[in-house]
Amino acid sequence: MIALVAGATRGTGRGIAVALGAAGATVYCAGRSTREQRSEMNRPETIEETAELVTAAGGTGIPVRCDFLDPAQAQDLAARVGREQGRLDVLVNDVWGGDGLWEWDTPVWKHDLDKGLRLLRLAVDTHIISARHLLPLLIKEPGGLVVEVTDGTWSFNETRYRENVYYDLAKMSVNRMAFAWSNELRPYGGTALAVTPGFLRSEAMLEGFGVTEDNWREAKVDSAWMVSETPAYVGRGVAAVAQDPDRLRWSGRSVSSEDLAVAYGLTDVDGSRPRVWSYITEVRESQAKEPATDQNGVDQNGAGQESADQKGAGQDDGDAWKAYR
């Protein structure tokens, strides 16, 4: 299996690259952060580290610096893969780089315009540029796979506004791109789908909450964090799709790591099967719709009691999360 992960430096991209390596794949680990030069994200993770993890997992990791906002660099990368391998079996578009560019719950007239447009370029243009130059390699043989990585499935996002217009457009656009590629690849026997992880324990999230993977449960975060997952979880799901001879059944769909784990009988590294999207819709949102009442069923919201909606997603909601892990 010859795979290329665009945005393999850290987080979901790294998790998918390593899982493909564990399946024996040769994985081109493409991104901007190297040991010699960091991207604007200014984080320590590098594509060389990811490639080493791929090799250690049983595959062959090849680090390649590429800025997917530059079509010439993407074209050069495609030419290299073509020379060295002659084909491409799996393309994972996980380029993001938008951290620090978006503002929570900020209307368009208050949000920084330049940052918002930069976010869209990083999150949308990069995926199109990647597809433009790498899909010709993918269709050389039937059965190619494209995975678009996003945040939130199409069904989840279509009825919920995702923080601000730039983030909302970015994540819905990536879902739509997977549908577009599924149509364009159909004549060539190719498969394309969108995949979203859940609450991800990425390097940046762990650092931001002041914990490590060893003590992540100690983070002072709302209870949805207790249903979080490692990047390996979604990685295992993508690797399972890549090895599935019947993977065409996924084409055009937008799914979560939970969906793939259930379909293929997978677990996270600790043996759990996190279901954070189900937790959000079945527990959090249902609580927000229920009025707070006393033991006689009298609505207490107007009497100084905190309603479920006022309580919000940032507060603890007991041990309900345990059923979703």
Image (cartoon, grey):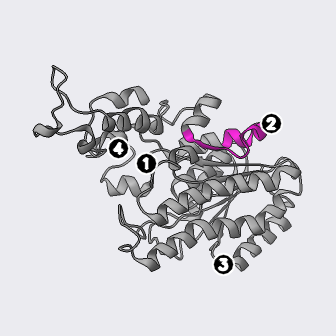
Residue located 43% across and 37% down the image: 281
Q: Nearer the viewer's eye, disc 4 or disc 2?
A: 2
Q: Earlier in the sequence, mark 2 or mark 1?
A: 1
* Coordinates of residue 248 in the picture (x, y in percent): 78, 41
Using the image, determine if residue 234 lies above or below residue 9.
above
Q: Which mark is residue 201?
A: 1
User: Within 10 angstroms of label 2, few (less than 14), some, or many (20 or more) residues?
Assistant: few
Q: Amino acid at mark 2?
A: Pro
Cα–Cα gap, marks 3 and 4: 37 Å
C-beta proximity under 8 Å, tags 3 and 4:
no
* Coordinates of residue 257 in the picture (x, y in percent): 56, 40
Q: Earlier in the sequence, mark 1 or mark 4?
A: 1
Q: Is residue 252 magenta?
A: yes
* Coordinates of residue 262 in the picture (x, y in percent): 59, 30
Q: Which mark is residue 290?
A: none
C-beta proximity under 8 Å, tags 1 and 4:
yes
Q: Which mark is residue 245?
A: 2
C-beta proximity under 8 Å, tags 4 and 2:
no
Cα–Cα gap, marks 4 and 2: 36 Å
User: Within 10 angstroms of label 4, few (less than 14), some, or many (20 or more) residues?
Assistant: some
In this picture, residue 135 sits left or right of residue 319 = right
C-beta proximity under 8 Å, tags 2 and 3:
no
Q: In this figure, which residue is indicated by the disc labeled 4?
A: 216
**What stretch of residues is rendered in magenta?**
239-257
Q: Which mark is residue 70?
A: 3
Q: Amino acid at mark 4?
A: Trp
Whether residue 267 is visible to the viewer of this picture, yes or no, is yes
User: Within 10 angstroms of label 1, few (less than 14), some, or many (20 or more) residues?
Assistant: many
